[in-house]
Image: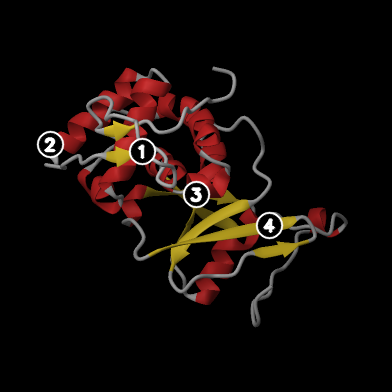
């Protein structure tokens, strides 16, 4: 997988020939000297919000970009950020070989929106957010977290929670936190890659709803 990195495979996985990424990711990233956290659909699933078991593992790290891993049923996708959020925004989960760093529910929600193109689009992001939004506490959107994510992402997330998913509590908590942080909302397209022609700004989130978002089973 990576030169110089070795893993002792637990007996229960030898016969299968496939080792879950959760068992070696922390050790691998430490070996490479790369900060990381497991995010997106995988973090959402660990928080109890996932309609389907993710078919690949999403790992967020810093630059330079890491190539994806694809071997015998194991698929790891790496996403790169200039800097990772503070450790306070991450959580540690116990696994058989130690611990795994994952994004908090609020950071997971933001990443689902920011990297929606990596998971199949806003429809899928909204489907997962429908469950994830229910476990977001009122104090989830802290100043360090707000600073770690672009304002446009918070606008899109707030719009999805309030208008698409009808979850006023987390939406209000996010809006209040953004206002207290002095965050300015500018006109932002819901789908960055789609045209905004003929679509006026909607809601207090200053979002241009240039696509129709249709979550599953709602």
Residue 196's mark?
1
Q: Secondary structure at mark 1?
A: loop
Sequence-wise, which precedes: disc 4 or disc 1? 4
Task: Give the Cα distance between marks 2 and 4.
Answer: 41 Å
Q: What element does badge 4 sit on?
A: strand
Q: Which residue is mark 4?
A: 75
Task: Please identify the quarter of the rendering in which residue 135 is found.
Answer: top left
Residue 116 in the image: state x and y as whole percent.
49, 44
Q: Residue at x 34, y 22 (%)?
A: 162
Q: Quadrant of residue 84?
A: bottom left
**Spatial distance from mark 4 to mark 3, Cα to Cα?**
14 Å
Q: Residue furthest front?
A: 198
Q: Which residue shows up at 32% across the image and 26% down it?
A: 170
Secondary element under disc 3, as helix, strand or loop, is loop
In this view, which residue lies farthest toward the right?
15
Disc 4 to disc 1: CB gap under 8 Å: no
Instruction: Give the distance between the C-alpha atoms of the residues marked 1 and 3, in whole angstroms.
Output: 30 Å
Reading the image, the residue beneath label 3 is 39
Dot 2 lies on which element?
Answer: helix
Q: Position of residue 178 (x, y in %)?
A: 19, 37
Q: Which residue is mark 2?
A: 180
């Amino acid at each position: 997988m990576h030169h110089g990195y070795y893993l002792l495979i637990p007996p229960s996985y030898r016969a299968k020939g496939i080792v879950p990424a959760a068992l070696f990711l922390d050790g691998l990233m430490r070996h490479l000297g790369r900060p990381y956290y497991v995010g997106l659909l995988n973090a959402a699933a660990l928080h109890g919000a996932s309609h389907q078991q993710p078919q690949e593992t999403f790992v967020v790290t810093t630059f330079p970009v890491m190539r994806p891993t694809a071997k015998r049923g194991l698929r790891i996708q790496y996403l790169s950020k200039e800097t990772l959020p503070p450790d306070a925004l991450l959580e540690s989960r116990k696994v058989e070989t130690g611990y795994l760093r994952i994004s908090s529910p609020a950071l997971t929600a933001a990443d689902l929106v920011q990297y929606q193109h990596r998971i199949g689009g806003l429809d899928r992001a909204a489907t997962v957010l429908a469950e994830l939004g229910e476990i977001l506490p009122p104090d989830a959107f802290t100043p360090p977290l707000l600073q770690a994510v672009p304002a446009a992402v918070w606008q899109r997330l707030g719009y999805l929670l309030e208008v698409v998913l009808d979850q006023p509590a987390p939406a209000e908590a996010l809006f209040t936190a953004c206002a207290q942080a002095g965050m300015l909302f500018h006109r932002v397209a819901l789908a960055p890659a789609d045209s905004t022609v003929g679509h006026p700004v909607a809601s207090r989130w200053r979002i241009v709803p240039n696509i129709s978002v249709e979550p599953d089973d709602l």
